[in-house]
Amino acid sequence: MFLGGQARWRQTSFGGSVKWRIGLAAPRATCPEVTVTMDSLSKLERSNRMRLIRPTDTRPELTVRHFVHKLGYRYRLHVASLPGRPDLVFSSRRKVIFVHGCFWHRHNHCALARLPKSRIDFWLPKLNGNKARDVENRRALTRLGWKSLVIWECELQDPMRVMFKTLMFLEE
């Protein structure tokens, strides 16, 4: 509520973030506070960096494809007719494998699934939407009679465990 006088913006720095206070005629305790975090990259640099992120042929996906092929299984890639375009499709077995990045698909309790520091109002709905879409795609696959397995990016730190998990999934 503006009680008269001129509004003044005052910048204060605290813990790496920039805070702006509106100085009004009202007492300081009732002044609203807005936290603004600056991006360390320019718009062009951020755009170029985001352009490098590809939806297919990621390093985790290539790793899984490599060891599944070494195990002797053959598969199709990114079948568009299936919900969610699974990364690996084993048509004869009616099984699919999704290789998810922890950040983009919001892996629970994973350090790689941290939120960005800037533009939370943009990122949070986007990432939560990705997660909700993944759940719905897996449900749709189940309704169609397909079984699915999700391999997370962070699980690839222990490749033997992932190979065993994949082998058990494909042989069940």
Image (cartoon, rainbow, N blue to C red):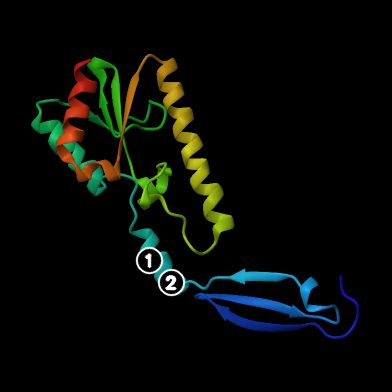
Splitting the image into 4 quarters, where does residue 158 fall?
top left
Q: Residues within 10 Å of mark 1 (few under 14, many from 20)?
A: few
Drawn side of residue 35 relative to residue 61, left or right = right
The reply to whether callout 2 and callout 1 are in contact (CB within 8 Å) is: yes
Indicate the quadrant containing the C terminus: top left, top right, bottom left or bottom right: top left
* Residue picked out by circle 2: 44
Q: Which amino acid lies under the numbered mark 1 shown in the image of this protein?
A: Asn
* Residue picked out by circle 1: 48
Residue at horizontal 52%, vertical 41%? 129
Where does the image place residue 21, in percent across and percent down from the top left?
70, 77
Splitting the image into 4 quarters, where does residue 84 fall?
top left
Where does the image place residue 167, in percent across and percent down from the top left?
17, 25
Mark 2–mark 1 distance (CA, rounded to whole Å): 6 Å
Q: Which amino acid lies under the numbered mark 2 shown in the image of this protein?
A: Leu
**Label 1: which secondary element:** helix
Residue at horizontal 51%, vertical 75%? 15
